[in-house]
């Protein structure tokens, strides 16, 4: 193994353990500037839309892309000038990149061999890793004979076999079909929970991020727009992207008591008593639609809208509404038929104050 | 233009119009393409057939067992194999540099590498003489310092053949390298492999089929090499007289021997082609 510089275990103070990075990558029109901190044992998910710079951040951590600025410290050791092959970093690539000419066993043994372990010893270690992944029976299989889920576990074993202090996973579940995904996700969660160093994973799937990670870092346009625990982020989204991801209607406005006046729009009545700039969020299922102006409900949080689009969402129908306010509403297929919803249809939308949630911006 | 209405309207009518539609799918071959195409085929095959038709089948066994033929064949196989080895050892790294390394003037270097492909081999032979001849730019030092003279030796044959054949290998391997996913090398790097280890343990096995195909092409080219060889290495039986030179010489005083020698080369070529097909071309 390559122990670079001084042994960090002896010198590094407790707060120096783990990852401390500011990753700046300048690419002409695109600039990534993301700060990341994580303690050993943390699983951090970089979540963001395609093209947000998540994968670039991951490649910068691995040393496959040079930093334009910033720093990268792992367990107290500066990594920015260390070439990728000398970094104590393991990577699980999006499509795994298992070496097609090597068996699963030799794929996993590759890392230990490169670090100077003898052939027999490297293979013994690889066999142990495969066994831990439940793949002992597939040690002799070439990658093309492995299923997607098996290949994913071999890739994870291969990355872990070098005993990295930082494990990077690029869209670890994206290459799997929906059914395998469910199973592999829970396995991966277990393996990540056992991993004692820092793990950073990149995904555009909020569910993967929330299941696998302790902490989310939401990246948009090369910047961190929000970070926190999955619960915090799901409860208090701060951008439209996150709100859409977690399935919430999100508005920004000025609160005065229980009323929040939206920028260039109507007011929303909430249960929280706040003043100043706030976010208001409510789920699409909290919205009730009427074809005619309802008489029985209070006039608060009642808006006249028009259907801009309809799409099926499981056994629900999601209506995209414009008009006095832009919002998404979920309703059952039966209700949609009864309301005779179609694009361009006028509707009245209402949401109870108790279903909304306001928090300071 | 012409309204296709009528046949369209007639089609759902019944069985009648359906047959022409099936026939229309299997479109006929236009005569202006068919005739020249068949001519081209005949042009390529008739000379080979003529070789078989005129072969002195009766005297063939004695022809093939003569010492000169065996000498020439042996020399050809050895020198072509040695030239392929030289091309592999030097050409694969060059192909890697062209495909993966970033350096100024790479396009120019690639053009220069392919130059021997289009250069008349005789010119190559002359150029080799000027470079490696006893008084050549490099050759005079080889002679003065090490006492090595390359022209008109078996080593000279190998050099002439390698000069002509190596570009085939470089082009073939470079193409395979460009098609190979460079991210495998990145994956190897993140596992602790240096760039050379990544090349040796990951890239090389991945591009092995391309290297093999390139080696076979280079070997076949070296086996048939004539112009550069006769110019740079001369035509000494047993030392520099390879099969193609023997064929040419035999044609002047013993045409039957020339045909016999040609048949051997034809058989070797067909064997190479068959090998290529089975091993590397069907999978691709």
Image (tube, rainbow, N blue to C red):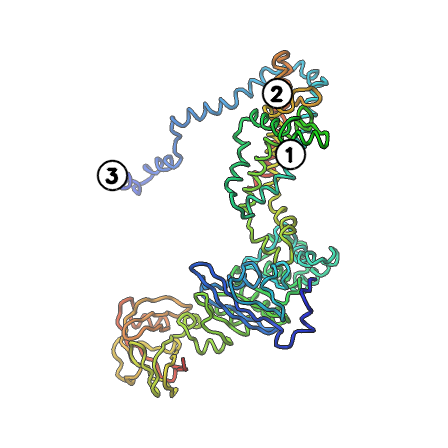
Callout 3: chain: B
Q: Which residue is mark 2?
A: B262
Counting from the top left corner in percent of width and height, residue B134 is at 66, 26
User: Closer to the camera, A114 or B70?
Assistant: A114
Residue B37's place in the image compared with B198, above or below, is above
Query: To which quarter of the image does residue A151 belong?
Result: bottom right
Q: Quadrant of the C terminus of chain A?
A: bottom left
The residues tagged by marks 1 and 2 sit, at their Cα atoms, a distance apart of 22 Å
Query: To which quarter of the image does residue A307 belong?
Result: bottom left
User: Closer to the camera, A178 or B247?
Assistant: B247
Q: Are marks 1 and 2 in contact (CB under 8 Å)?
A: no
Residue B13's place in the image compared with A333, above or below, is above
Residue B104's place in the image compared with A275, above or below, is above
Reading the chain from its start, which is encountered first: label 1 or label 2? 1
Q: Please tell me the numbered disc located at residue B3.
A: 3
Q: Please tell me the numbered disc located at residue B84.
A: 1
Q: Please tell me the numbered disc located at residue A38.
A: none
The residues tagged by marks 3 and 1 sit, at their Cα atoms, a distance apart of 63 Å
Q: Secondary structure at mark 1?
A: helix
Q: Nearer the viewer, mark 2 or mark 3?
A: 2
Residue drawn at 42 percent across, 24 percent down: B35
Q: Are marks 2 and 3 in contact (CB under 8 Å)?
A: no
Callout 1: chain: B
Answer few, some or many: residues within 10 Å of disc 1's Cα (few below 14, many 20 plus, some between 14 and 19): many
The residues tagged by marks 2 and 3 sit, at their Cα atoms, a distance apart of 60 Å
One can see residue B271 in this view: no
Reading the chain from its start, which is encountered first: label 2 or label 3? 3
């Amino acid at each position: 193994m390559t122990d670079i510089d001084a042994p960090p275990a002896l010198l590094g103070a407790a707060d120096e353990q783990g990852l401390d990075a500011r990753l700046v990558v300048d690419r002409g029109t695109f600039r990534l500037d993301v700060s990341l901190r994580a303690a050993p044992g943390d699983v951090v998910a970089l979540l963001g839309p395609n093209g947000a710079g998540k994968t670039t951040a991951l490649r910068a951590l691995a040393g496959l892309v040079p930093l334009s600025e910033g720093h990268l410290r792992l367990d107290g050791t500066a990594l920015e000038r260390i070439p990728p092959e000398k970094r104590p970093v393991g990577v699980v690539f999006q499509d795994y990149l298992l070496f097609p000419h090597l068996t699963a066993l030799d794929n996993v043994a590759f890392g230990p061999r490169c670090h100077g372990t003898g052939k027999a010893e490297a293979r013994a270690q690889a066999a142990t890793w495969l066994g831990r992944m439940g793949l002992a029976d597939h040690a002799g299989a070439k990658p093309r004979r492995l299923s997607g889920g098996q290949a994913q576990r071999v890739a994870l074993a291969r990355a872990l076999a070098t005993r990295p202090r930082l494990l990077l996973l690029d869209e670890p579940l994206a290459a799997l079909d929906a059914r395998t995904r469910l199973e592999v996700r829970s396995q991966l969660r277990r393996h990540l929970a056992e991993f004692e160093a820092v793990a950073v994973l990149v995904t555009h799937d909020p569910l993967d991020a929330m299941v696998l990670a302790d902490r989310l870092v939401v990246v948009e346009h090369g910047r961190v727009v929000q970070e926190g625990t999955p619960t915090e982020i799901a409860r208090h989204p701060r951008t439209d992207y996150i709100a859409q991801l977690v399935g919430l209607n999100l508005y920004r406005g000025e609160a005065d008591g229980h009323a929040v006046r939206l920028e260039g729009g109507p007011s929303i009545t909430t249960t929280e008593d706040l003043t100043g700039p706030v976010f208001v969020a409510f789920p699409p299922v909290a919205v009730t639609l009427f074809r005619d102006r309802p008489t029985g409900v209070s006039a608060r949080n009642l808006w006249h809208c028009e259907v801009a689009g309809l799409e099926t969402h499981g056994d629900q129908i999601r209506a995209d509404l414009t008009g006095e306010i832009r919002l998404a509403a979920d309703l059952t297929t039966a209700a949609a038929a009864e309301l005779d919803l179609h694009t361009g249809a006028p509707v009245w939308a209402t949401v109870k104050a108790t279903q909304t949630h306001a928090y300071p911006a | 233009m012409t309204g296709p209405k009528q046949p369209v309207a007639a089609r759902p009518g019944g069985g009648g119009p359906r047959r022409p539609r099936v026939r229309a799918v299997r479109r006929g071959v236009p005569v202006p393409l068919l005739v020249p195409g068949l001519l081209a085929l005949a042009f390529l095959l008739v000379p080979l057939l003529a070789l078989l038709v005129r072969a002195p089948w009766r005297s063939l066994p004695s022809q093939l067992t003569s010492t000169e033929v065996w000498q020439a064949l042996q020399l050809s196989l050895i020198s072509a194999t040695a030239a392929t080895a030289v091309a592999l050892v030097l050409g694969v790294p060059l192909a890697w540099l062209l495909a993966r390394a970033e350096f100024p003037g790479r396009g120019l270097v690639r053009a220069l590498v392919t130059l021997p492909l289009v250069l008349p081999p005789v010119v190559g032979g002359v150029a080799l003489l000027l470079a490696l001849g006893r008084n050549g730019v490099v050759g005079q030092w080889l002679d003065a310092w090490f006492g090595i003279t390359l022209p008109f030796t078996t080593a000279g044959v190998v050099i002439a053949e390698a000069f002509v054949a190596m570009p085939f290998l470089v082009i073939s391997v470079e193409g395979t390298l460009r098609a190979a996913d460079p991210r495998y090398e990145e994956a190897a790097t993140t596992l602790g492999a240096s760039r050379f280890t990544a090349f040796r343990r990951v890239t090389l096995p991945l591009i092995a089929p391309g290297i093999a195909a390139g080696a076979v092409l280079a070997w076949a080219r070296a086996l048939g090499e004539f112009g550069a060889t006769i110019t740079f290495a001369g035509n000494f039986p047993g030392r520099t007289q390879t099969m193609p030179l023997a064929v040419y010489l035999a044609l002047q005083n013993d045409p039957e021997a020339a045909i016999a020698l040609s048949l051997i080369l034809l058989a070797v070529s067909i064997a190479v082609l068959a090998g290529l097909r089975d091993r590397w071309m069907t999978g691709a």
